[in-house]
Image (spheres, rainbow, N blue to C red):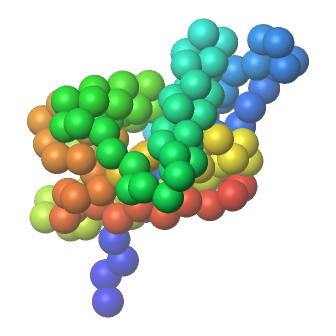
Amino acid sequence: MRLEPTITLSIKESGDRSNSYYQYHIFLDGKPLTSQSLSPSDSAAVREISRTFGSLFEQGGCRPEKDASAQRALGARLFSLWLASTWDKTLAATPSGSSSLLVIASEPPEILNLPWELALPPRGEFLGIDPRFFLRRLPRSG
């Protein structure tokens, strides 16, 4: 039995609360591909995305809705912030035709609450409906 490649996005928050930022590492099958940090302003934008998205579920029992263009914009932003810098390298390292597991491993809960299924590569589908990817969230980094 062949296991699918595992892409892990491991995220921690650093800095003091007034100027905190996210540090992240991307691994492919446990081997490091990159270590980067979001700027404090991009990190603040991520927290706002998480709050805004979470508030959709608090609107009195209705199903949360976003129009298609808003979903695409949000998905493109998530992809750009976290995955774009190593995406081509990651795909090149995975066997052609295989499915991959994308693990979001994060201590800060606002990261786990992001709509990762909407992450949208420039040439592809939302990761949540792309048959080449499975998503899993883990409440820890590493």
- The x, y position of residue 81, in whole percent, is 44, 25
Q: Is any part of residue 27 visible from this angle? A: no
Residue at 69% across / 58% down in the picture? 139
Quadrant, the N terminus: bottom left
Residue at 62% across / 61% down in the picture? 138
Q: In front here: 83 or 20?
A: 20
Residue at 23% across / 36% down in the picture? 67
Q: Is residue 138 left or right of residue 33?
A: right
Q: In front here: 101 or 114?
A: 114
Image vertical order of residue 44 relative to residue 66, above or below: above
- The x, y position of residue 135, in whole percent, is 41, 61
- The x, y position of residue 3, in whole percent, is 36, 77
- Picture quadrant of residue 70: top left
Q: In front here: 89 or 56?
A: 56
Q: Is residue 62 left or right of residue 44?
A: left
- The x, y position of residue 130, in whole percent, is 20, 57
Q: Is any part of residue 105 visible from this angle? A: yes
